[in-house]
Image (tube, rainbow, N blue to C red):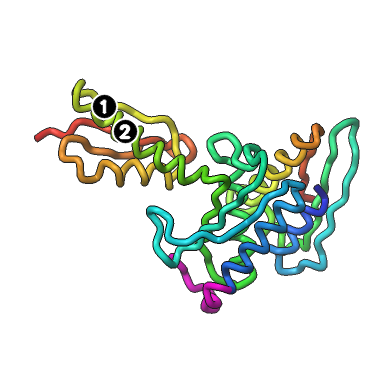
């Protein structure tokens, strides 16, 4: 799931080298933390959070297929 | 394909198709969903220049999602990836296992059925909330019917089509 978010983020920001995604397990919840350059924040969030929402939708599909729970934080 | 030029012109269509196909295949593979992506042209209701990517494979239901929500996100992200790369807006449609095509036909027959009911009863009927593309399909289906009028009410995701009798 980390790779999925990394791929999308790197493809849509201006500074792909600054993209990192870390994974932390909180109980049975996988928390993905996406870091991007400050000026790229808007690029991964989108107007009214539309881009972040689309990434979360895909993430949810993968999590359900793997019978787990995942959450995306943009930090 | 409708394009809006921002900074530079779009590359030839073959290149766009291949970049979009790669992006979509990559998304599917990273999602762990086996599926084949192939470009389709000249489907019903499309112009020859319109790029449609079709995904085929086993158990793709989760890729469509409730009311096609996952499919919409997938299409949105593919366009985002491709348009960021070329610094120009792209309109690539993504279809999964013929969902959009079936949904279009279903919408068309729903529109006709409801229109008949509106004519019989003389009362307006409001359909359930739909996306802009789906509402457009309903409007287009009934555009030439002199006995009913269609319009949309509501905001954002709750926007829905009303079919009402037209006074002669």
Residue at the limit of the structure toward the top, as seen here:
B121
Could one spot residue A42 in this view of the protein? no
| Segment tinted magenta in the rendering | B1-14
Tag 2, which chain? B
Q: Residue B57 at x, y = what percent? A: 65, 46
- Rate crowding at label 2 as few (under 14), some (14 to 19) or many (20 or more) other CA atoms within 10 Å: some
Q: Residue A69 at x, y = what percent? A: 80, 34
**Picture disc at residue B124:** 1
At x 57% / y 67%, what residue is drawn? B17
- Contact (Cβ within 8 Å) of mark 2 with mark 1: yes
In the rendered view, would you say A63 is above or below B78? above
| Disc 1 secondary structure class | loop
| Disc 2 secondary structure class | strand
At x 57% / y 47%, what residue is drawn? B96
At x 67% / y 63%, what residue is drawn? B22
Identify the residue under disc 2.
B162
């Amino acid at each position: 799931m980390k790779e999925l978010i990394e791929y999308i983020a790197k493809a849509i920001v201006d500074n792909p080298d600054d993209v990192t995604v870390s994974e932390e397990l909180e109980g049975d919840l996988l928390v993905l933390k996406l870091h991007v350059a400050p000026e790229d924040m808007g690029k991964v969030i989108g107007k009214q959070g539309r881009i972040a929402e689309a990434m979360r939708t895909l993430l949810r599909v993968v999590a359900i297929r793997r019978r787990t729970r995942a959450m995306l934080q943009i930090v | 394909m409708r394009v809006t030029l921002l900074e530079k012109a779009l590359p030839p269509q073959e290149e766009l198709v291949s970049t979009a196909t790669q992006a979509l295949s990559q998304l599917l593979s990273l999602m762990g969903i086996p599926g084949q992506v192939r470009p389709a042209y000249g489907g019903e209701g499309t112009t020859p220049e319109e790029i449609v990517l079709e995904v085929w494979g086993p158990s793709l239901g989760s890729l469509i999602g409730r009311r096609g929500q996952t499919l919409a996100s997938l299409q949105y992200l593919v366009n985002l990836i491709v348009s960021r790369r070329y610094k120009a807006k792209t309109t690539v449609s993504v279809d999964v296992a013929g969902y959009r095509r079936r949904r279009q036909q279903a919408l068309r027959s729903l529109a006709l059925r409801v229109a008949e009911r509106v004519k019989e009863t003389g009362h307006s009927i409001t359909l359930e909330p739909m996306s802009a593309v789906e509402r457009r399909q309903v409007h287009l289906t009934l555009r030439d019917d002199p006995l009913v009028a269609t319009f949309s009410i509501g905001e954002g995701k709750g926007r829905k089509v009303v079919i009402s009798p037209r006074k002669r």
